[in-house]
């Protein structure tokens, strides 16, 4: 009898499920000044951690509840995301979203697109008047590099006999993607994998990932 392979699939959110980086876009639209650009430079030079960078940048945003909701309702997601999770769901494949964005943003976007039941691991944000305050429920006490330790969230969801799959685009996906069996990569993540001669499946949109699973399942 043919053994049915079990999969666990992890998605990054920004520029993987969405068609662009939502945090970067929000910084452009809603930052009260240009301090976020300087923080970005310091982070790229390795002078500050990504947690420090994200906290400084997002806390420099000024936005009202109304314009935040207006913005969130316009966020575009990959047109194949729903199809893909539908396919995975139909095969009882476990899915989790690992993001450096915020639970409040992800849950709004999923609700808006009528996507239910996704397991979300992310940072948190609270809006008081027009200021955002961040918290990091999935930070790693021993490694200060990331705001959300995607590797720990990933490891907590991998079962011994399942094939783990990671789909992502950015530098915060480098660490977790080194602990799975199959990596789908685009943009910075793909550049990293290519520069380090690591094996991955390049993808442009989730249509490519959908086709892959359609073929193997
Ligand atoms: Mg991303």
Image (tube, rainbow, N blue to C red):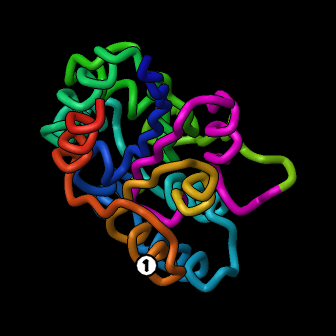
Label 1 sits on residue: 194
Residue sitting at the far front: 1
Identify the residue shown where x is 52% and y is 57%: 173
All told, the count of numbered labels is 1
Identify the residue shown where x is 47% and y is 30%: 7
Q: Is 102 on the left-hand or right-hand side of 66?
A: right
Q: Position of residue 143 (x, y in %)?
A: 80, 57
- The verdict on residue 195 being magenta is no
Identify the residue shown where x is 33% and y is 69%: 187
Task: Give the quarter of the image for residue 216.
Answer: top left
| Any part of residue 64 in sight | yes
Magenta-tinted stretch: 143-172
Establish if 17 lies above or below 83.
Answer: below
Q: Position of residue 8 (x, y in %)?
A: 49, 31
Q: Is 14 on the left-hand or right-hand side of 175?
A: left
Residue sitting at the far right: 142
Q: Is 127 on the left-hand or right-hand side of 87?
A: right
- The verdict on residue 155 being magenta is yes
Establish if 15 lies above or below 74.
Answer: below
Task: Give the quarter of the image for residue 68.
Answer: top left
Of 160 and 56, nearer the camera is 160
CB at disc 1 and ligand 1 closer than 8 Å: no
Dot 1 crowding, Cα within 10 Å, few <14, some 14–19, many 20+: some
Identify the residue shown where x is 26% and y is 59%: 203
| Kind of element beneath mark 1 | helix
| Any part of residue 76 in sight | no
Establish if 118 lies above or below 32.
Answer: above
Quadrant location of ligand 1? bottom left
Of 193 and 128, nearer the camera is 193
């Amino acid at each position: 009898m043919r053994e049915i392979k079990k999969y666990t699939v992890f998605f990054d959110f920004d520029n993987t499920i969405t068609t662009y980086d939502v945090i970067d876009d929000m910084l452009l639209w809603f930052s009260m000044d240009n301090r976020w650009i300087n923080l970005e430079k310091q982070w790229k030079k390795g002078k500050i951690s990504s947690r420090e960078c994200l906290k400084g940048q997002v806390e420099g945003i000024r936005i009202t509840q109304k314009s935040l909701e207006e913005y969130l309702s316009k966020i575009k997601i990959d047109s194949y995301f729903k199809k893909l999770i539908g396919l995975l769901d139909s095969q009882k494949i476990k899915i989790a979203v690992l993001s450096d964005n915020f639970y409040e943003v992800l849950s709004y976007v999923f609700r808006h697109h009528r996507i239910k039941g996704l397991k979300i691991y992310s940072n948190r944000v609270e809006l008081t008047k027009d200021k955002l305050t961040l918290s990091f429920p999935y930070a790693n006490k021993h490694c200060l590099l990331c705001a959300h330790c995607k590797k720990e969230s990933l490891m907590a969801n991998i079962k011994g006999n399942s094939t783990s799959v990671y789909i992502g685009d950015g530098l915060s996906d480098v660490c977790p993607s080194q602990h799975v069996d199959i990596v789908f990569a685009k943009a910075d993540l793909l550049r990293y994998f290519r520069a380090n001669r690591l094996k991955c499946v390049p993808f442009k949109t989730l249509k490519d990932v959908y086709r892959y699973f359609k073929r193997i399942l």
